Image (cartoon, grey):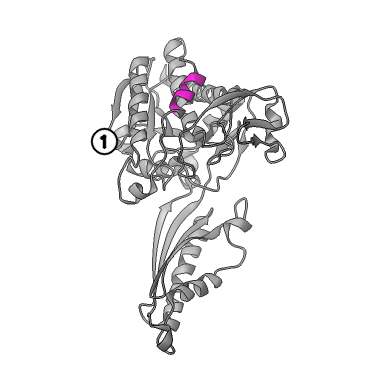
Amino acid sequence: MNIIDRFIAYTKINTTTNREKGAAGIMPSSDGQMVLAQKVAEELRTLGMENVQVNERAIVTALLPSNVDYSLPTVAFFGHLDTSAEHTGDAHAQILPYSGGDLCLNKEKNIFLRQSEFPELADYIGDELIVTDGTSLLGADDKAAIASIVNAVQYLIGHPEIKHGPVKVGFVPDEEQGLRGAKAFDVQAFGADFAYTLDCCGVGELVYENWNAGDADIIFNGQSAHPMSAKGKLKNSLLMAHKFIAMLPGGEAPEYTEGREGYYWVKQMQGNSARTVLKMDVRDFTEQGYRQRMEFLGKLAENCAGLWGEGSVVCNLADRYANVYNSLQGENRFPIDIALAAYQACGIEPKVIPMRGGYDGAALSQKGLPCPNLFTGVHNFHSIYEYLPVKSLQAASNVVIEVIKQTHNRFAQGSAQ
């Protein structure tokens, strides 16, 4: 099966992550993820991979054994099975030639992929684009990764003259809600020495820096009263929450920041006059900045409780994931160097970017598996305007193959002697 057919076959399986089930601790949170896991596992068995396993959480693992008689480190590649819950409908993938200007996705509904809104389309004139009909996500985040990795495995098995060490693959569920699959992944049992996720955007992007991320749940406990006799009695928890939000640093929110600028994201507020729960995301690229932000929220809650009474404000802070950069320093930097060499060998200019988000590699790196992030070629994640140039999909798979070659070249010197 070629890489395009493989990818489109994956898009036909609805793997939308289910936030409610995820919050209840269910993994995978949607049945489609297990369906896709079983399908991919069967493909890997058919190709000839060994130790292909799918556990009860839809985590897929497999091994392509070394084809040399000397010791080499084990490199692994990861993708995630789920797609964002921003749109829950089935994907309707189509391949359209792109000759410039606006691209009609759905004539009946008058839906266009417009170059004025997405100027990077100009880079793909003359290419074919995989898109939807404008009514759903494409799901290339992250099914393009799975297709690229499986295609690379197929190529290596079909070309035994390419020398390589052990290669492992891992596909995990529910990345789209806090990297849950990666956090549940048993790195020690997996047995890889270093790894790569494929979960960033256009050709050439390379990520080895992302947020330090935390969650803040702040509970405001007021006192309800009937409005006809509320004077001196009513303590409105909703207004307490609003006053708390007003005391956050101005301009330090997602809509005002870019690059490596951190933020506080007021994400959700629910309640009534008696009790209100405020949910916030805290993000910063530096570990010091992240800790300062978390400490600020705790201190602000403490001071507000001093004003409004004991127990009126309860602040619960939790770490979500750390900056992968922390795990790729010193002797652990070599996966970055291998990726850069692979890009160069493929004629691709690296575009090193800090990711203003998280990816499975952050959780895997914290567990001791150094894991930079490679491109898939996808644009417009989590949008009905998501598109994947055919040549970019193939380029992603080529980079996987080249990383495996570069791993052999780097470590074979001396090992084969």
Residue 101 visible somewhere in the drawing:
yes
Q: Is residue 6 magenta?
A: yes
Give the residue at x 62% y 50%. 259
Q: Amino acid at mark 1?
A: Glu
The local secondary structure at tag 1 comes to: loop
Question: Could you say which quadrant of the image residue 363 lies in?
Answer: top left
Left-right relation of 169 to 394? left
Left-right relation of 223 to 257? left
Farthest left residue in view: 56
Q: How many marks?
A: 1
Q: Give residue 403's position: percent from left, percent from top.
A: 50, 25
Residue nearest the observer in this picture, 90 or 11 = 90
Residue nearest the observer in this picture, 94 or 72 = 94
Farthest front residue in view: 108
Give the residue at x 72% y 39%. 116
Give the residue at x 43% y 19%. 153
Q: Is residue 92 magenta?
A: no
Q: Magenta residues: mostly which secondary structure?
A: helix
Residue position for label 1 = 56
Q: Give residue 383's position: percent from left, percent from top.
A: 55, 41
- Specify start and end residues of the magenta stretch as a single range: 4-10
Q: Is residue 261 above or below residue 110?
A: below
Q: Look at the image and tell me in which quarter the C terminus lies.
A: top left
Question: Could you say which quadrant of the image residue 263 lies in?
Answer: bottom right
